Image (cartoon, grey):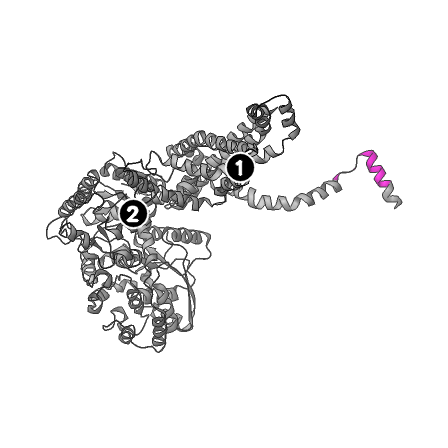
Amino acid sequence: MVTQGRSGAWNHRERPPRRRRSWAGWRFVGPFMAVFALVFLAPIAYSVYLSLFRTRLIGGTAFVGAENYVKALQDPRFWSAFGRVAAFLAVQVPIMLFLALLVALAIDSGRLYGSAFFRISVFLPYAVPAIVATLMWGFMYGTRFGLIGNLNETFGVTLPDPLSPELILASIGNIVTWEFVGYNMLIMYSALRVVNHSLYEAAEIDGAGQLRVIWSIKLPALRGTLVIATIFSIIGSFQLFNEPSILRTLAPNSVTTYFTPNLYAYSLSFSGQQFNYSATVAIVMGVITMVIAYVVQLRGIRKAS
Amino acid sequence: MIRGRVVSPREIEKGMPMTMNRRRALLVGAALTVSLLAAGCGSSGDGGPGGGSGEAAKPAGVSDADVTNALNTGGSITVWAWEPTLKQVVADFQARYPKVKVSLVNAGTGNDQYIALQNAIKAGSGVPDVAQVEYYALSQFALGKSITDLNAFGAGELDGTFTPGPWSSVRVGDAVYGLPMDSGPMALFYNKEVFDKHDIQVPATWEEYAAAAEKLHRADPEAYITSDTGDAGFTTSMIWQAGGKPYTVDGTSVGIDFGDAGTRRFTAMWQKLIDAELLSPVTGWTDAWYKGLGDGTIATLVIGAWMPANLESGVKAAAGKWRVAPMPQWEAGGRATAENGGSSLAIPEAAANKALAYAFVKYAAVDEGVRARVDGGAFPATTAQLQDSAWRDKEFPYFDGQKVNQVLADSAGKVVTGWSYLPFQVYANSVFNDTAGKAYNSDTTLADGLKAWQDASAEYGREQGFTMK
């Protein structure tokens, strides 16, 4: 006992040999790190390893260094895929977040009758698996037997084909918006719920109207949340895969095998056996996504402070 | 769409009723002859061709003893296939050779299975002993030396057992990389009710076909002669029939030319149908497609002989309305057809029990297995089966009693020879809609679209180390 007490005091005084404490920390972090290394770092490391080689049907596997990266950066298919998701990002994400914001504010306003019902029904599409949602929308988009077909027939009009090459991206945007408005709404709504109500009372006493409250209290309170929602949406847009992949079976001429970067990586790997190049495309796209998400985050934080 | 051909076999759902299964198992257990088997199944006719002899595996040469040995010693093999009629074959085979255990695994349909197979071969573990491989994909595996040359088991002596189309499809040079399991000689499937209603004659030539397309669509703007949104399998088969030989393969030296006379013949005719918007813009194997086949808005299909079972199971609404006619010809009185789909059974190089695997493959593709598969609705690739009168004269209620097999078997004998697929056809087909598909929804012509497809395929070939001519 005495020894322990003394050594404790000694430790306290003279900066301890840290070894023991740091090991204790590792024991806590260890399980996480092990799983993290196994399911996170190892696949990335393996992808990087793969991307340095090239396997051919004739001639086998050879180390090619950065050749795959050079090729990816000059690949018109890759850039066309990137351009497509970038356009998608620029148009769909603002629309979706704006809609989510409106709904969140409406439900939070407390003036809505049956807000619990609206909250759950707007959120419900998020609970529908993307595959099912796309199949459902794909059916509605059908010009012959789907909803569009029925509208055409009922009103004697000829609506443009949502699955044509010109409109397919907008149609996918519509599906994604439908799916994710509720999710983003919920994030924003929960951020609004934690705003201190005394602020609203103060605003009321000062004679501020609802719009003024939104502008001066609610939106500033949402800024951090909006940055997070934007980052999620950027990542989601760049990883667009399910929707085009399913619609491909309905409209094979509108959705190319390189429609989005993810679809391109998938096709390279699974129809072309080009695992190495596929890994390269995935890595390049991952890095681009990281950079853009990071820039958005930096800007968001700077504005917030 | 490639998917179409790939999915189709799965949809052959004409399985045997359970009572029949049981009876069959008993019969086989008693080692009865095929003729009795047939009688037991309620379909008349004498012994099937390959199945005529009661012995399942009779490979020639050195390996004869090995294979017989393997069957007697027993063991277990794994078969990767999605073709539904093989289920019965496996049951029969196990009943016939009680010491042999066959596990039939559906590792995916078409491309999905090839991916799994390629991965297993690459990993060097979990490789099946037998794998179903479609003809167009066979040379890709042969090239990678991932499947076995069956000459070692005497497969070379089976020359003449199979119809020329499938037999040439499983051979690369002198090597035999699989035994043909079924085939898809093309024919014209048409909706007689629609034809009668608009007083359209069954077209014998493509010229008449195009005229029929126009007449039909003019009479009923909702109705189309057929649907096409760009399908690699269909397009290559059409070029095949027209005498085109766009692919020349000599080992690792590969030529692609979609500018030859046969190809131009097809594109010129088909372009007219595209330009006049006489093709229904419905993609094959979708719900809308099945619906169109049922309600008469898609009036014909030029497709492989495996289609009847698909129509029966997928388009019940049109029972009694469809008929089968010979494929339209390029010249009046011509006799040329092409293959569309079909698959073989191959043995991976890494298979653990090759002798037993071959015994099974032969049983399924040459011997008694053929009978069971044909009864289940498959279209055979063996000449003897195709000449079997009971089979030929079978009346199909779905086709209002038409003896459909006669038309289809005739087609099998007229397949244009000399066609070959690319050693990387799986990839090429996957980018068909990126390139040639543009002909169906933009100003690009079919000829230009095919040129783009040629370029994309050649680019891949070069990257993969082929010598592109």
Hey, which quadrant is residue B38 in on the image?
bottom left
Pointer 1 chain: A
Q: Nearer the viewer, residue A80 or A192?
A: A192
Q: Callout 2: 10 Å neighbours few (<14), some, many (20+)?
A: many
C-alpha separation, residue under disc 2 versus residue under disc 1:
65 Å
Identify residue for label 1.
A113
- Residue A140: x and y in percent read 36, 43
- Residue B159: x and y in percent read 24, 62
- Residue type at mark 2 is Leu
Determine the secondary structure under disc 2.
loop
Determine the secondary structure under disc 1.
loop
What span is in magenta?
A6-18
Residue A267 can be seen, yes or no: no
Pointer 2 chain: B
Q: Callout 1: 10 Å neighbours few (<14), some, many (20+)?
A: few
- Residue type at mark 1 is Tyr
Q: Establish if B88 lies above or below B186.
A: below
The residue sitting at 26% across, 69% down in the picture is B50
Residue A12 lies in the magenta-colored region: yes
Q: Establish if B47 lies above or below B309.
A: below
Residue B57 can be seen, yes or no: yes
The nearer-to-camera label among 2 and 1 is 1
Q: Establish if B30 lies above or below B10.
A: below
Q: Nearer the viewer, residue B135 or B196?
A: B196
- Residue A301: x and y in percent read 59, 26
Residue at the limit of the structure toward the left, as seen here: B332
- The C terminus of chain B - image quarter: top left
Identify residue for label 2.
B422
- Residue B19: x and y in percent read 35, 72
Per the rendering, the mark at residue A275 is: none
